[in-house]
């Protein structure tokens, strides 16, 4: 195995162990074997991390943006140099194939550090002239931010939150998902090696109770969660009682509409990327695939052929293109939905079974003839299960696509230019795609509407969510008063 983190937590610039908390076994999804063990943070560890973040914040904010940015960009360079090692670790943590992790995880994290590192020096307020008087605004950090991550992109999530937060002069305590605790520790290690002052980025392990303790603490000004809607409700409510800022990156059940005039191969590629990448464990997946009547058979035929070309196997083998699910529990959830799909009358086109090998492998699964009311068309599965629904025309399909409580992403495949933009405008979703699916470059805002979230990650928009404006009124002459 690759170089592993050397302790459970990273606090005040160094690895930190405290075996007093309950043990969290780290299971390699490809074998089901325990490969490491960390300990949940005790109250003392939580307090030490928050105290370190609080103490470090004023000096970190007092540095110039250029100085802060240089450290983040140096960390990006180190991540890229160690991409292989970090990708191997990401694969051990999540089970995602190395073919994916080597291009989508540490690299995406490095992009965020580079982008926000570059932006740090450009963050300014503005000058507002009022006759002889004037107002100026200062863009100030919020203070101590808490990041709480899901298990599907542990390196990326840590950096998508830390990079804008740190660029703005905040400090952070990050709690990874208990399912994938290792990668965020390496992020902390690399940031420290790049020159980040002690206490600016801390990692503590634990389950939801540790996350809840972090959010409830008076020293915390903001919480950014990537997780499910039920967890989002709890975290949002807890933050609300302290009037804390939030970013919520939550779940989805996104539509992908394929019109008769679409290029079939591109549409199939979009459906594969939007359903089977990371074994379907991607929040923005387009799992409700609406296919127009004229292209349906061609689409399903090509999809079946191309799914047979998936290389399922050892995720550390660079040839493997489809790996296990993250955990036995997640696989059981997906199997439960597959059973529901069959019970409710959807037609199983391919897959549907657990593979006969160690680890948590589920076949890429496609259901056709899915009705809008079926459970597999309404609930987020977070596994490799695609639901194909029929439609006749645009007027019918757009309201159906929007008829969901979620609003994370949506996509359309068509060669009709005006229709593509009309539909993108009509989609009730934060992140929309035309003739592509699931791109998430750091330059573009990413996030959801409706139950899928609040706020945006990535891009200039993220700065708004990690800073606050102070207005300073300046009077140049004498001041009159009524008495
Ligand atoms: P969960 O909502 O189960 O957990 C998310 C994180 O919140 C975990 O670290 C979890 O800890 C923690 N947590 C749980 N309860 C609380 C609480 N009461 N207070 C504070 N923290 C808490 O999500 P999963 O990890 O299962 O991830 C899958 C979900 O994440 C899916 O719904 C998916 O759509 C969504 N997601 C959204 C993305 C987006 O950008 N919109 C991207 C990726 C995933 P622990 O699990 O250790 O107990």
Image: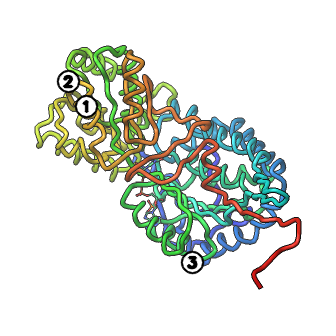
Name the secondary structure under disc 1. helix
Q: Are marks 2 and 3 in contact (CB under 8 Å)?
A: no
Q: Kindly report which numbered mark, 2 or 3, lies closer to the viewer in this rendering.
A: 2
Label 3 Cα neighbours within 10 Å, binned few <14 / some 14-19 / many ≥20: some
The C terminus - image quarter: bottom right
Residue occupying the far right of the picture: 477
Q: Nearer the viewer, residue 404 or 23?
A: 404
Q: CA distance from mark 2 to mark 3?
A: 58 Å
Disc on the earlier residue, 2 or 3: 3
Name the secondary structure under disc 3. helix
In the rendered view, would you say 327 is above or below 324?
below
Q: Are marks 1 and 2 in contact (CB under 8 Å)?
A: yes
Q: Position of residue 462 (x, y in %)?
A: 61, 48
Q: Position of residue 24 (x, y in %)?
A: 48, 63
Residue drawn at the location 37% of the way across and 15% of the way down = 265
381 on left or right of 96: left
Name the secondary structure under disc 2. loop
Q: Mark 2 sits on what residue? A: 392
Q: Quadrant of residue 394?
A: top left
């Amino acid at each position: 195995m690759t170089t592993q983190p050397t302790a459970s937590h990273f606090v005040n610039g160094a690895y930190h162990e405290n075996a007093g908390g309950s043990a969290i076994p780290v299971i390699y999804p490809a074998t089901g074997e325990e490969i490491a063990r960390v300990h949940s943070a005790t109250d003392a560890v939580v307090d030490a991390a928050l105290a370190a973040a609080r103490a470090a914040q004023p000096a970190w904010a007092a540095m110039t943006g250029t100085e802060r940015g240089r450290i983040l960009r140096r960390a990006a360079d180190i991540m890229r140099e160690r991409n292989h090692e970090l990708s191997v670790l990401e694969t051990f943590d999540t089970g995602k194939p190395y073919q994916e992790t080597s291009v989508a995880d540490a690299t995406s994290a490095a992009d965020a550090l580079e982008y926000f590192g570059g932006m740090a020096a450009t963050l300014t307020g503005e000058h507002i002239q009022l006759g002889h008087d004037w107002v100026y605004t200062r863009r100030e950090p919020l203070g101590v931010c808490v990041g709480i991550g899901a298990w599907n992109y542990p390196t990326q999530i840590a950096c998508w939150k830390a990079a804008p937060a740190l660029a703005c002069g905040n400090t952070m305590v990050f709690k990874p998902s208990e399912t994938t605790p290792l990668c965020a520790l390496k992020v902390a290690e690399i940031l420290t090696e790049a020159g980040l002052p002690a206490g600016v980025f801390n990692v503590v392990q634990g389950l939801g109770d540790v996350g809840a303790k972090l959010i409830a603490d008076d020293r915390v000004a903001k919480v950014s969660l990537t997780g499910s809607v039920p967890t989002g409700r709890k975290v949002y409510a807890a933050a609300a009682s302290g009037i804390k800022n939030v970013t919520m990156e939550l779940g989805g059940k996104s539509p992908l509409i394929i019109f008769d005039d679409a290029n079939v191969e591109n549409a199939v590629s979009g459906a594969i990327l939007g359903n089977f990448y990371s074994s379907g464990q991607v929040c923005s997946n387009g799992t409700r695939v609406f296919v127009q009547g004229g292209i349906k058979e061609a689409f399903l035929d090509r999809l079946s052929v191309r799914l047979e070309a998936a290389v399922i196997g050892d995720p550390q083998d660079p040839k493997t293109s489809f790996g296990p699910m993250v955990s036995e529990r997640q696989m059981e959830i997906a199997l439960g939905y597959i059973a529901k799909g069959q019970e409710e009358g959807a037609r199983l086109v391919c897959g549907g079974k657990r593979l006969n090998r160690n680890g948590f492998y589920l076949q890429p699964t496609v259901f056709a003839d899915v009705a809008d009311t079926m459970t597999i068309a309404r609930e987020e599965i977070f596994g490799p299960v695609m639901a194909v629904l029929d439609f006749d025309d645009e007027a019918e399909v757009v309201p159906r696509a929007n008829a969901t409580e979620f609003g994370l992403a949506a996509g359309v495949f068509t060669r009709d230019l005006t229709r593509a933009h009309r539909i993108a405008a009509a989609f009730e979703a934060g992140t929309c795609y035309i003739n592509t699916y699931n791109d998430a470059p750091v330059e573009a805002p990413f996030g959801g509407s409706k139950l899928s979230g609040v706020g945006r990650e990535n891009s200039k928009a993220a700065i708004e969510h990690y800073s606050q404006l102070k207005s300073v009124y300046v009077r140049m002459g004498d001041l009159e008063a009524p008495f």
